Image (cartoon, rainbow, N blue to C red):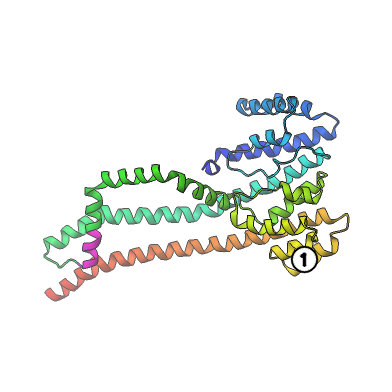
């Protein structure tokens, strides 16, 4: 759930800045431990400074660099490089991390921006419903009773629900809390998976980009495939395992990839043509970025439909309210006249 907190944005930003600084310091000739020491001394956030010092201690004890890097990311943000023990090209690795997580942060911010207006509409709809149930409804029920007007069955049903909620609100809340406490082991993993898939989605675009990072860092393709773990994305994991098995058994990378994942003809031809060339690593990143842009466009179209749907739902609630209240009243007035 921590992935939803706005404070986590700052921690992702710090991670991105640190990877950029490490890349620049390493290129300038500093070793890794000295680079981390310089960055930690310059860090104003004491808690994050402590984490950087712990990373330096991790390296002093001979532990894996990437395990320490993973701790610098917020909890819930996936890190796909924990299996690396040796990095032949460390400056390049940090440069690629900077680029990848910068794009990921931009995607999260876009997701928040896209969801903000639909969330407001959902809140407005919920508030309107509560206002009708607990304020307007009792007024109209009493008004109908005073005029001896027959109350519509639909309004009686809603009134019964409202009375039941008011009378047994304590028991309803207690049951809800009890269900949440005892259902947490079942609900939380699913909810966490749902949240990660919304705000930190994983797709074939990410797999290609992560593979490109491994290759740019000096890791061979078969070793890279063995290092990638997708436990948080079970649907994608099945396809990836099919692709992984085909390559490890001697199949061609591009052919196996195209057999396991749905790619456009344009991207398939690029992969098949450039697989044996020096441009292959850059091609993987380019294709990953193009697929991600296309996926974001699809998400944007889906979110655009949420707004009119919520407006239609508000209109239905208003129409239902008018039908259940004013129309019976008008009918009674007409009969009197």
Q: Position of residue 227 (x, y in %)?
A: 72, 46
Secondary structure mostly seen in magenta is: helix
> What residue is drawn where x is 54% and y is 60%?
303
SS at circle 1: helix
Q: Could you tell me which quadrant the C terminus lies in?
A: bottom left
Q: Position of residue 120 (x, y in %)?
A: 45, 53
Q: Position of residue 118 (x, y in %)?
A: 48, 56
Q: Nearer the viewer, residue 169 or 333?
A: 169
- Residue 289 is left or right of residue 176, and the answer is right
Quadrant for residue 101, please give it: top right
Bin the neighbour count of mark 1 within 10 Å (Cα to Cα): few under 14, some 14-19, many 20 and up.
some
Q: Position of residue 68 (x, y in %)?
A: 68, 33
Q: Nearer the viewer, residue 212 or 98?
A: 212
> What residue is drawn where x is 28% and y is 66%?
322
Give yes or no for residue 135 being in the magenta stretch.
no
- Residue 147 is left or right of residue 193, and the answer is left
Quadrant for residue 44, please give it: top right
The span picked out in magenta is 152-159
From the image, tell me which residue sits under label 1.
268
Count of number-bearing discs: 1
- Quick one: which residue is furthest to the front in this view? 249
Q: Is residue 278 visible?
A: yes
On screen, residue 101 above or below 321: above
- Quick one: which residue is furthest to the right in this view? 277
Q: Is residue 337 visible?
A: no
Q: Nearer the viewer, residue 184 or 32?
A: 184
Q: Nearer the viewer, residue 92 or 220?
A: 220
> What residue is drawn where x is 84% and y is 59%?
275
On screen, residue 249 above or below 231: below
């Amino acid at each position: 759930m921590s992935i939803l907190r706005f404070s986590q944005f700052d921690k992702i930003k710090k991670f991105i800045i640190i990877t950029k600084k490490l890349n620049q310091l390493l290129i300038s000739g500093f070793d890794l431990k000295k680079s981390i020491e310089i960055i930690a001394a310059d860090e104003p956030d004491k808690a994050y400074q402590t984490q950087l010092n712990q990373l330096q201690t991790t390296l002093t004890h001979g532990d894996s660099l990437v395990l320490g890097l993973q701790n610098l990311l917020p909890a819930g943000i996936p890190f796909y490089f924990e299996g690396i023990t040796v990095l032949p090209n460390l400056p390049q690795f940090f440069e690629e991390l900077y680029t990848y997580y910068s794009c990921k942060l931009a995607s999260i911010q876009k997701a928040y921006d896209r969801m903000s207006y639909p969330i407001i509409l959902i809140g407005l709809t919920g508030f309107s419903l509560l206002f009708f149930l607990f304020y307007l409804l009792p007024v109209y029920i009493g008004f109908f009773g005073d005029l001896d007007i027959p109350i519509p069955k639909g309004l009686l049903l809603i009134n019964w629900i409202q009375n039941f909620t008011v009378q047994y609100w304590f028991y309803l809340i207690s049951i809800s809390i009890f269900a949440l406490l005892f259902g947490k082991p079942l609900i939380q993993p699913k909810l966490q998976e749902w949240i990660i898939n919304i705000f930190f989605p994983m797709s074939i675009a990410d797999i290609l980009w992560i593979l490109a990072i491994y290759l740019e860092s000096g890791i061979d393709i078969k070793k890279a495939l063995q290092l990638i773990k997708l436990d948080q994305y079970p649907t994608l994991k099945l396809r990836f395992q099919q692709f992984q098995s085909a390559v490890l058994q001697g199949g061609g990378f591009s052919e196996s990839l195209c057999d396991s994942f749905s790619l456009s003809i344009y991207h398939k031809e690029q992969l098949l043509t450039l697989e044996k060339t020096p441009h292959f690593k850059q091609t993987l990143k380019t294709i990953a970025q193009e697929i991600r842009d296309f996926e974001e466009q699809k998400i944007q179209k889906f979110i655009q439909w949420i707004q009119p749907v919520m407006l239609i739902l508000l209109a239905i609630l208003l129409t239902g309210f008018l039908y259940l209240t004013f129309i019976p009243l008008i009918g009674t007035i007409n009969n009197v006249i």
